[in-house]
Structures are given as C-alpha cells and as structure tokens.
Image (cartoon, rainbow, N blue to C red):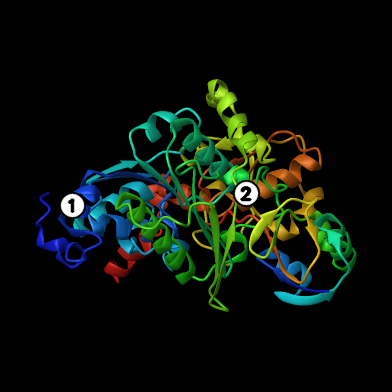
C-alpha cells in the first residue's frame, strides 16, 4: 500500500488526516472480536479506511436470521463461518490490506497471544463472559479496548483501558445475574442499531490511531435510536479493579469466564457427532414453523416455552440431546432439565443450522434440485 | 427538591417509563434506590449503575440538590 493510493483521497485531503495520518492507519493492527451485528459495520469501515492489518475472530456460522443486520453477508454465505465469510467479502472491498480470519472461539487459552499481535481490540461480542474475558485480556496485554453493546433500541459505546483510563470493570465490576439481561436472539433488535453503534466504534478506533479527539475514553456514551437521544456519562478509573485483574494474570488461562458470569457448564455435542448417536432422545425446542427440520434425528418437538409442562413425557433414564436453531435456546432448555434432575443431558453446538450443514445429503438445497427436475 | 430520573435499557421496561420526575428530600443514592425498588419491585432484581448529572457514582453518594439521575444497566448484545 502507498499513502498516495487514490482510494483514500477523500480522507487524505482532510487536514486532520493527511498523508501522515494515512500512514498511521496503514501501520495499525486492529483485532475485531465477533463478526456479527456490531462486527460487520466495524470491519467494513476499518477495512475501507485502510487499516493495514485487521484480525477477525468468530466461531459462529452465518444464519439467515443474521442477514437483516450483518451486512457483510448474503445468501451465498449462509452456513459459512463468519470470520472466513467476512474476510472473503472484505478482501473484495479492499485488497490493499492484510486480513487475518480466526474461525474459532476466543478463549483464555488463545486471547493473550492473539491480543499481543494487535494495537487495538474492538469488542463486537454478544455475551458477558466474552466481554469480561476481552476486558481482562486487554488489561493484561495493555491494549486499548473500543467497546460497544446493544439492547433492543439502545446502544453503548466507550473506550476502555486507554491512557490510564477506566476499564469495563470500573463501570460494571461484576456481570449481571445470569438470565437477567436477554440477548438479541431472544428479544430482537432493529438492524440499523448495530449499524450505528458499530460505526461509532469504528470512528473511535480511527481517532485513536490518528491521534484525534479520544474524549470518549473515561465516558460511556449511550444512544437510543427511537428517541435519537444521546447521553454521555463520566466514568472514573477504579484502580482496585484493574489491580485485581493484573494480580490474577498468572492464572488467566485457567479462569472460567462462563462460570464467573453464572453460566453452568453445559455439555455440548457437535453436529457431526449427533448423527452417530443412536440411543438418545433428541428434542427440538424451536417453534413448529422453524426450518430446516432435522427429520433424520427423529426429534420430539417441544418449543422451549412448553418444555416445563411436558417434562413428564420425557424418560429421565435416557440420554437427552436438545437442539434449537443456533444453540442459545437449547442451553436454556438444558438449564430447565438440570433443574428438574435430568442428568444425562446435552445440547448441539450451532443447533439446526449446524446439523443441516453437517448432513449434506439432507440439506435444504434438495429443494433446488427437485425444482430443476420439474 | 425535584429529581429527573432516566431509566435505560431493560430498566425502562421494568418501570414502564423512560423518564419521570420525583420530589424527594436530601438522601443517599442507596436511599433513593430503596424508594424506587418499593415503587417498582422488578428493579430490586436488576443490575445497574447510577449516575448523578452524568457522573457515575457510588451508592453512598448524596443527592442534595435538583439533579438528573440515570439508571444504567449493562448490555451484552452485539
């Protein structure tokens, strides 16, 4: 890449950026956690602006219900890993930069090594355990963290761990009680909201690199897309919170963030393995209209909301394997089953989407071939 | 004195309002929350931070003049 690339002309002519600013962007390395609702706009603008090296980590796969907000993906990406699908799309958007895709889950085992390779970390994740993990790994590796999160029509943006500013734990030292904050997949989200919040995160990343105004550090900005009201709050650094993380750093790899966030250790089965299990009772906890159906497993259909009342139809002696569309509702189902003393229970990672992909012969694509025959 | 209280995220659902005014004598944040928990029992089980005039504060902070109070829950969605 050279700094006179006409691609960047409109931003290079801004006196606040110039050729020297474009060089800073080219030299920068930014890691984006999650290529979902927030990750897509973050990545799109950072790639377009010419950040020299971009990392994308996401273990999830593209589902049709993602497309109304995860604007890097289309029909052709369905079933693909998000990090890989995003990389493919982004390389078409800008081939002058380097993009690394990590199609895996961010864990305490890979976070520190990964973060060390980048200058700035951007959090576009969708759950508290990842958010605390990302925050702590940023403190330990001393990387600024550009935070964004959404709930229904509201979003939050902040810069953490920057120039001795506060961290996420200085704002929220402890995660909320498990289940008290529902996720987008449970309560819905307007597609434009992560677009706005993710774009704001990208804006903050660019300003950090360009050494422009970074006053959002030490602040939490909130935005409501219904009222279009934005309010910013001052946050103080709480040294004891940061010291706690640094003191626990030698044991970081063994820290269980799911447990810290109140999540029980729920046994997962891969979609590939599910088809070889012959003795278990499979339960589909999706609503009856949801597709694709996984008939090969001969599942009992009990929508999550009815599970509590239908427990007596299940055999507690038998192994029970639950699935939903993507693996979130099935976790809830497991919690219900565990509470009612069902012991031999597990759920399928990635849900029906993963199952459908693991069984190419039974894919919905069959509709296409029968269409051709007709 | 009059407080203007703003509820964010799921707190707005728990209270069924985004914003309201309240008459109150000088009190700590914790005392204000007790009153709010009484009025909205759902709030008692929710996690959030409190800001006075856009400054995040601790439960022992004193509210002694007209102020804008904000109740901010954490979000995880992305």
Closer to us: B16 or A336? B16
Mark in front: 2 vs 1: 1
Closer to us: A360 or B16? B16
Image location of residue A334, percent across then percent down: 69, 44
- Crowding around mark 2 (Cα neighbors within 10 Å: few <14, some 14 to 19, many 20+) is many
Mark 2 or mark 1: name the one nearer the start of the chain. Answer: 1
Question: Chain ID for label 1?
Answer: A
Q: Is residue A244 left or right of residue A58?
A: right
Closer to us: A50 or A35? A50
Point out the residue furthest to the front here. B65
Q: Is residue A189 left or right of residue A28?
A: right
- Crowding around mark 1 (Cα neighbors within 10 Å: few <14, some 14 to 19, many 20+) is few
Identify the residue under disc 1.
A20
Question: Chain ID for label 2?
Answer: A
Q: Residue at x 63, y 53 (%)?
A: A329
Quarter of the image with the C terminus of chain A in it: bottom left
Q: Is residue A49 left or right of residue A305?
A: left
Identify the residue under disc 2.
A171
Image location of residue A196, percent across then percent down: 44, 68
């Amino acid at each position: 890449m050279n700094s006179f690339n006409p691609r960047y002309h409109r931003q290079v002519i801004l006196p606040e950026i110039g050729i020297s600013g474009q060089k800073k962007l080219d030299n920068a390395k930014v890691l984006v956690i999650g290529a979902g609702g927030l990750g897509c706009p973050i990545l799109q603008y950072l790639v377009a602006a010419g950040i020299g090296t971009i990392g994308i980590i996401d273990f999830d796969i593209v589902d049709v219900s993602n497309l109304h907000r995860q604007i890097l993906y289309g029909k052709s990406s369905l079933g693909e890993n998000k990090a890989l699908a995003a990389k493919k799309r982004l390389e078409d958007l800008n081939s002058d930069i380097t993009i690394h895709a990590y199609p895996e889950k961010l864990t305490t085992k890979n976070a520190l090594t990964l973060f060390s390779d980048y200058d700035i970390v951007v959090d576009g994740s969708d759950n508290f355990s990842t958010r605390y993990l990302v925050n702590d790994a940023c403190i330990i590796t001393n990387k600024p963290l550009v935070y964004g999160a959404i709930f229904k029509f509201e979003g939050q943006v902040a810069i953490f761990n920057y120039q001795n500013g506060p961290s996420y734990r200085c704002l929220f030292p402890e995660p909320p009680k498990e289940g008290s904050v529902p996720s987008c997949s449970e309560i819905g989200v307007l597609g434009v909201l992560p677009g706005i919040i993710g774009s704001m995160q990208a804006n903050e990343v660019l300003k950090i690199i360009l050494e422009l105004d970074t006053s959002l550090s030490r602040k939490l900005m909130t935005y409501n897309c219904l009222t279009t009201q934005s309010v910013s709050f001052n946050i103080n650094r709480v040294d004891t919170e940061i010291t706690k993380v640094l003191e626990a750093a030698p044991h970081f790899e063994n820290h269980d963030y799911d447990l810290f966030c109140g999540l029980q250790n729920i046994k997962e089965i891969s979609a590939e393995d599910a088809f070889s299990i012959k003795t278990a009772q499979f339960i589909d906890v999706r609503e009856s209209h949801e597709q694709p159906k996984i008939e090969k497993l001969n599942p009992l259909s009990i929508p999550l909301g009815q599970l509590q009342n239908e427990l007596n139809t299940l055999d507690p002696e038998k192994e029970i394997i639950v699935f939903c569309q993507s693996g979130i509702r099935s976790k809830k189902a497991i919690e219900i089953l565990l509470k009612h003393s069902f012991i031999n229970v597990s759920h399928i990672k990635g849900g029906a989407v993963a199952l459908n992909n693991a069984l190419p012969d039974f894919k919905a694509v069959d509709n296409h071939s029968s269409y051709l025959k007709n | 004195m009059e407080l203007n209280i703003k509820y964010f995220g799921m707190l707005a659902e728990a209270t069924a309002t985004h914003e309201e005014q309240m008459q109150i004598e000088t009190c700590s944040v914790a005392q204000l929350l007790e009153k709010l928990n009484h009025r909205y029992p759902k709030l008692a089980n929710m996690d959030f931070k409190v800001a006075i005039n856009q400054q995040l504060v601790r439960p022992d902070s004193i509210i002694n003049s007209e102020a804008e109070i904000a109740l901010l829950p954490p979000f995880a969605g992305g």
